[in-house]
Amino acid sequence: MSPEFSIAELAQTIAVRRSGYYAWQQRQAEPGPRARQNAVLLAHIRSIHQEHQERYGSPRIFHTLRQQGIRCGHNRVAQLMREDGLQAKRKRPFRPRTTQAGSNPAPNLLAAAAPPTAPNQVWVADITYIWTQEGWLYLAAVMDLFSRRIVGWHAAEHLRGSLAEQALEQALRLRRPGPGLLHHSDRGFHYGSKTYRGLLSSAQAQPSMSRKADCYDNAAMEAFWSSLKNELIYPRSPSPRTQTVNTLFQYIEIYYNRHRLHSSLGYQPPAEFEQCAGNPGART
């Protein structure tokens, strides 16, 4: 349908030039500086989001942008991500029981201990589960509480005591902590066994255990399990056990320890945080 009045008639009525009207119309069609800046920033956000396999939400993407020298605000990043439908993946499936009560519990030394000031002062340990095409795969890990670095881990299709023992043996072999290390875990039989206690004794480490049925005593490990499952396990379809173990290696050793930004470490990866702690002049 043609307009009731021509552009020329309308321009004459409101006393403006037709050339002025067309120039105004063109300006409305072109994006302004802010819109162009947002388009460039969104491209960077999408790139980081994909690089980290959709594991990052707005806080980590914001800090990654700042580390890359891109000036922006967190609220602006969050708004652009919200408008573009970008978010970190989340899911909460069924959780089987992985801790079986053991005897001979150790006292909770972690609750009264001062926060660690260097690596190999406090380690925390726990066990979790992962569903595969062939059934459950159980994962034991040991974390350095100072840097949140995973210093030892082992995966197996069983929950026998050797599961946790092999994770600890790896940590002791790679890190060689000095006397006085505080090792904290839950009250599961894995950590109270004679063999496990023997490994700690040989390393002159002090055993510590959480209070009964209190997961908050081992919150750092619970946070790691949540990150691993939300970022690696839940977004994927179950795979065979061998492939799952290979995927765990890639996530733990290459991504989490060396590249993933950790909010409690000032948005640094654990390995970089340890390096900076040993070199005060390094970037923080």
Image (cartoon, rainbow, N blue to C red):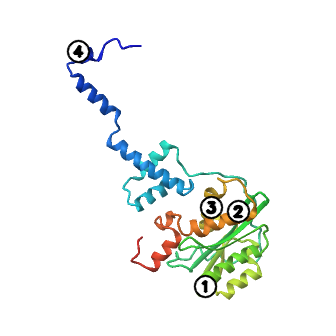
Sequence-wise, the earlier of marks 4 and 2 is 4
Sequence-wise, the earlier of marks 2 and 1 is 1
Res 15 → quadrant: top left
Could you tell me how far apart the alpha carbons at marks 2 and 1 are, in whole angstroms?
28 Å
Q: Residues within 10 Å of mark 4 (few under 14, many from 20)?
A: few
Could you tell me how far apart the alpha carbons at marks 3 and 4 are, in whole angstroms?
67 Å
Could you tell me how far apart the alpha carbons at marks 1 and 4 are, in whole angstroms?
87 Å
Mark 2 lies on residue: 244
Mark 1 lies on residue: 176
Could you tell me how far apart the alpha carbons at marks 4 and 2 are, in whole angstroms?
74 Å
Indicate the position of residue 184 as horizontal and vertical percent values.
64, 75
Against 65, is 174 above or below? below
Sequence-wise, the earlier of marks 3 and 4 is 4
Mark 3 lies on residue: 228
Q: Are marks 3 and 2 in contact (CB under 8 Å)?
A: no
Mark 4 lies on residue: 13
Query: From the viewer's perspective, is 160 left or right of 209?
Result: right
Which amino acid, by three-letter code, is at mark 1?
A: Arg
Indicate the position of residue 187 as horizontal and vertical percent values.
72, 71
Could you tell me how far apart the alpha carbons at marks 3 and 2 are, in whole angstroms?
12 Å
- Residue at image location 48% in from the left, 76% down from the top: 275
- Residue at image location 68% in from the left, 66% down from the top: 246
Which quarter of the figure is the C terminus placed in?
bottom left
Which amino acid, by three-letter code, is at mark 2?
A: Thr
Res 180 → quadrant: bottom right
Q: Tell which of 125 and 101 is nearer to you.
A: 125
